[in-house]
Every structure is written in structure tokens, then in C-alpha cells.
Image: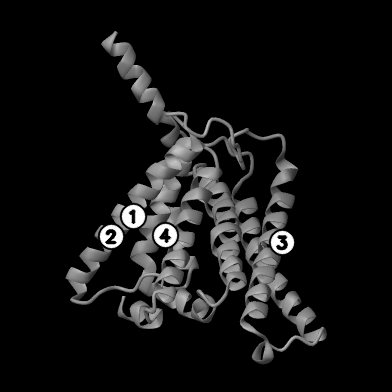
């Protein structure tokens, strides 16, 4: 009886270690990653050109208009990049059901419930990022930056109005997590399991994920977040898990800063101090 329970316990953790059955090879991986990056850049440039043609002037736009433009830009980038990726990979269908899986069923199942493991992943991320920040502060003798570079760019929009806040939440809490988790975890990490074990693939993807944000001061925290996202996804084989963790993290930051601004705090000073 004890042995049976042990085997059931081991089986419950096997999904986190099992590799995916990937139907494509390295040329497809390289082509898809490059195509996604180029299509995202092109989508942004096309939107800018269209807005200029329509007479949009960023210097004369209101805060709400700027927020709306940022939302539309992120929406177009997300739709185009994911569309390109699916367009390439769909040529290999039918493939395994656990590739590009978005499944709302059984959210609290102990073995692979997407919402349960999103909560576990988020808890792990919060604890690990806090510890990483403390270690970096101890080693550097100063508080390390976290989210500062990217958030300073969004600073004028944070808490300015309900519309700007809603647009920011749509960008950081919905569109960005869907795009990044589908590309990094759903495609890149899964593809890497052709050559590496799943844990190693999680770590490699976390490194790429951290570098892709182009914020060197945030690399340790982004890497730790990427590890939490990768292992939570490998356990459930459901992209809703890392998307939920990513969305909760990003949205939490925006909502916290909005709350602090409404309370009269200078959030620019707080961000620069952090």
C-alpha cells in the first residue's frame, strides 16, 4: 500500500520532467523565432505609419489617447507574432495535444490543475524574487532595480485615469503574458526538449526570456520569474498556467503603483529608489 502511494506521488511529478514529443527540427525553431521577432517589429512600424497618416501626433495626444495607442500596438504585435508562429507550426499538425494547449478544465486538480499550479508558481516566484533581490542588495551594497526601466516608460500613464489604467492592465496583464508565454514557454521551451532535459530547457528559456526584456538591471529577477513560469508550465502542460502567473505578476505591479499614486506617493521616486 505504501509502495503504491509512493508510485502515485512520483507519477504526479513526472509531467514536470517529461519531454514533449516535438514534430519539428531546429531549422523550424530558428525560422519561427526570427519570424516572430521580425513580424512584431514590422507590426509596430506599420501601426506607427498608419497613425501618422491619420494625423496622430504623440506630442499633442492626451494621456488616454496615448494609452489607447499603446494598447492597439501591443494587440497588433501579439496577434501578428502569434499568427506567424501558428502559421508555421500548423504545417506539422497533427501533433501532441500538450503542445499549444489552452485548457480551462479541472483548474484545481492536484497533479496538473492550471489554476492551482499557477498559484504555486506565483508563490514560488514572489519568494524567489524577494530572496534574489535581498542577495543582490547584499552583494552590491545597494538595492537592485526591478521593473524600473520598463515602468519608468509607462509612468505617465499609471493611475492617470480609469481608461489609462485599464489599457495598462490590458497590455501588461493580458496581451503581453499571452504573447510571451506562447512564444517562450509554449514554443521555445517545448522545442528545446528535443535536445535537452526539461529542467535544462526551463533554465535556458529563462535566460533568453530575461535577456529579451533588454533590462540588464532586472536580469536576476526576470530569470527567477522565468524559472517559475517554466516549471509551472512543465507540470501542467497547459499554457494557461504560466499566462496566469505572468498576468498576476504584471497586473499586481501596476495596481500597486496605481494605489500608491492615489495615496499621494511619488511613484517615480519610489521606482528610482528601488
- Graded by Cα atoms within 10 Å as few (under 14), some (14 to 19) or many (20 or more), the crowding at tag 1 reads some
Instruction: Report x, y in % for residue 214.
Output: 47, 73
| Sequence-first disc among 3 and 4 | 3
From the image, tell me which residue sits under label 2. 130
Nearest the camera: 70 or 136? 70
Instruction: Report x, y in % for residue 8.
Output: 37, 19
Q: Residue furthest front?
A: 263
Q: Residue at x 53, y 50 (%)?
A: 243
Label 4 element class: helix
Please, is residue 47 above or below residue 77 in the view? below
Instruction: Report x, y in % for residue 111.
Output: 43, 29
The residues bearing labels 2 and 4 have C-alpha atoms spaced at a distance of 18 Å
| Sequence-first disc among 1 and 4 | 1
The residues bearing labels 3 and 2 have C-alpha atoms spaced at a distance of 35 Å
From the image, tell me which residue sits under label 1. 126
Mark 1 or mark 3, whichever is nearer to me: 1
The residues bearing labels 3 and 4 have C-alpha atoms spaced at a distance of 24 Å
Q: Is residue 113 visible?
A: yes
Number of the label disc, if any, that sits on residue 80: 3
Q: Residue furthest bottom?
A: 59
**Image quarter hosting the C terminus:** bottom left
Question: Are the residues tagged 1 and 2 within 8 Å (C-beta)?
Answer: yes
The residues bearing labels 1 and 4 have C-alpha atoms spaced at a distance of 18 Å
**Image quarter hosting the N terminus:** top left
Instruction: Report x, y in % for residue 21.
Output: 57, 35
Number of the label disc, if any, that sits on residue 207: 4
Image mark count? 4
Q: Residue furthest top?
A: 1
Amino acid at each position: 500500500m505504501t509502495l503504491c502511494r509512493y508510485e502515485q506521488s512520483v507519477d504526479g511529478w513526472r509531467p514536470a520532467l517529461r519531454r514533449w514529443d516535438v514534430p519539428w527540427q531546429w531549422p523550424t525553431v530558428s525560422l519561427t523565432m526570427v519570424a516572430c521577432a521580425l513580424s512584431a517589429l514590422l507590426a509596430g512600424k506599420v501601426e506607427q505609419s498608419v497613425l501618422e497618416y491619420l494625423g496622430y501626433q504623440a506630442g499633442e495626444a492626451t494621456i488616454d489617447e496615448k494609452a489607447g495607442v499603446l494598447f492597439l500596438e501591443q494587440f497588433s504585435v501579439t496577434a501578428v507574432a502569434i499568427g506567424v508562429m501558428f502559421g508555421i507550426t500548423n504545417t506539422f499538425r497533427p501533433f501532441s495535444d500538450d503542445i499549444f494547449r489552452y485548457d480551462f478544465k479541472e483548474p484545481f486538480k492536484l497533479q496538473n490543475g492550471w489554476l492551482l499550479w499557477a498559484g504555486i508558481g506565483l508563490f514560488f516566484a514572489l519568494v524567489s524574487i524577494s530572496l534574489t533581490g535581498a542577495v543582490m542588495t547584499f552583494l552590491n551594497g545597494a538595492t537592485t532595480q526591478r521593473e524600473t526601466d520598463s515602468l519608468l516608460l509607462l509612468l505617465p500613464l499609471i493611475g492617470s485615469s480609469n481608461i489609462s489604467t485599464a489599457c495598462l492592465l490590458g497590455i501588461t496583464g493580458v496581451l503581453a503574458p499571452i504573447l510571451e508565454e506562447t512564444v517562450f514557454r509554449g514554443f521555445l521551451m517545448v522545442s528545446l526538449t528535443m535536445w535537452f532535459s526539461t529542467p535544462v530547457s526551463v533554465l535556458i528559456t529563462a535566460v533568453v526570456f530575461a535577456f529579451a526584456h533588454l533590462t540588464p538591471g532586472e536580469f536576476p529577477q526576470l530569470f527567477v520569474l522565468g524559472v517559475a513560469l517554466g516549471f509551472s508550465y512543465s507540470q501542467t502542460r497547459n499554457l494557461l498556467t504560466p499566462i496566469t502567473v505572468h498576468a498576476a505578476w504584471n497586473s499586481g505591479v501596476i495596481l500597486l503603483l496605481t494605489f500608491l499614486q492615489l495615496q499621494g506617493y511619488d511613484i517615480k521616486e519610489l521606482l528610482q529608489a528601488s
